[in-house]
Image: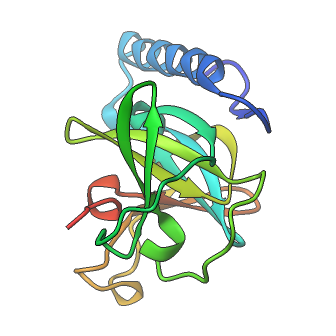
């Protein structure tokens, strides 16, 4: 692989341009692996990383549509407890999942560092309210391990794997399980 394995996202404004550049880079990496005859076990996870409390999480960049400031979330009466509310994103109403509530973490007030990561899931757009968004990273599949079965329940398994990086762990989320609205 060539290029910088990490890209720091801007602290303010949209990160669409950086995400688009990184998506192009991910596609080029995949094409290079294919041309070089590398097998699938050498694939790389391209992740947008974010924090909730002291933990770092990641989601596959191909699911991320954009990253926006956490403003103007309208509460919806009768919504599930983990739904913070809805936002109007260029004329479309998008539900916002509060990942702190979804993962049973202590609630916080919205501040300037919080972001909404807009993802596409099952042909629907959803927002994930996170404490902050930090980087886009490349994680080789060889350093990703499954979560031990003792660490979670089947009904609450939100984790696709754990990336073991040099000085940190990145929890890779399974968006289908993490953002289910039912």
Direction from residue 72 to residue 135 in the image, left or right: right
Which residue is at the front of the view, 45 or 74? 74
- Residue drawn at 23 percent across, 81 percent down: 154
**Looking at the image, is 50 positioned above or below residue 120?**
below
Q: Colour scheme used in the picture?
A: rainbow
> Where, by quadrant of the figure, is residue 102 drawn?
bottom left
Q: Is residue 44 visible?
A: no
Residue 66 locus on image (x, y percent): 52, 31
Direction from residue 69 to residue 74 in the image, left or right: left
Residue 50 locus on image (x, y percent): 63, 53
**Looking at the image, is 170 positioned above or below residue 77?**
above
> Where, by quadrant of the figure, is residue 60 drawn?
top left
Which residue is at the front of the view, 103 or 137? 103
Which residue is at the front of the view, 64 or 27? 64
Residue 5 locus on image (x, y percent): 68, 32
Q: Is residue 37 visible?
A: yes
Residue 173 locus on image (x, y percent): 42, 58
Which residue is at the front of the view, 156 or 13? 13
């Amino acid at each position: 692989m060539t290029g910088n394995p990490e890209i720091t996202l801007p602290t303010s404004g949209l990160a669409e341009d950086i995400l688009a550049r990184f998506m192009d880079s991910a596609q080029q990496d995949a094409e290079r692996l294919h041309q070089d005859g590398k097998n699938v076990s050498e694939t790389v996870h391209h992740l947008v990383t974010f924090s909730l409390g002291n933990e770092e999480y990641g989601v596959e960049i191909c699911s991320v549509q954009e990253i926006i400031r956490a403003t103007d979330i309208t509460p919806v009466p009768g919504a599930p407890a983990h739904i913070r509310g809805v936002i109007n994103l260029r004329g479309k109403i998008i539900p916002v999942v509060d990942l702190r509530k979804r993962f049973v973490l202590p609630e916080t007030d919205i501040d300037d560092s919080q972001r909404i990561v807009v993802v596409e899931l099952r042909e629907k757009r959803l927002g994930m309210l996170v404490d902050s968004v930090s980087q886009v990273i490349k994680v080789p599949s060889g350093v990703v391990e499954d979560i031990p079965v003792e660490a979670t329940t089947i009904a609450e398994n939100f984790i696709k794997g754990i990336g073991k990086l040099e000085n940190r762990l990145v929890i890779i989320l399974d968006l289908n399980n993490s953002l289910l609205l039912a």
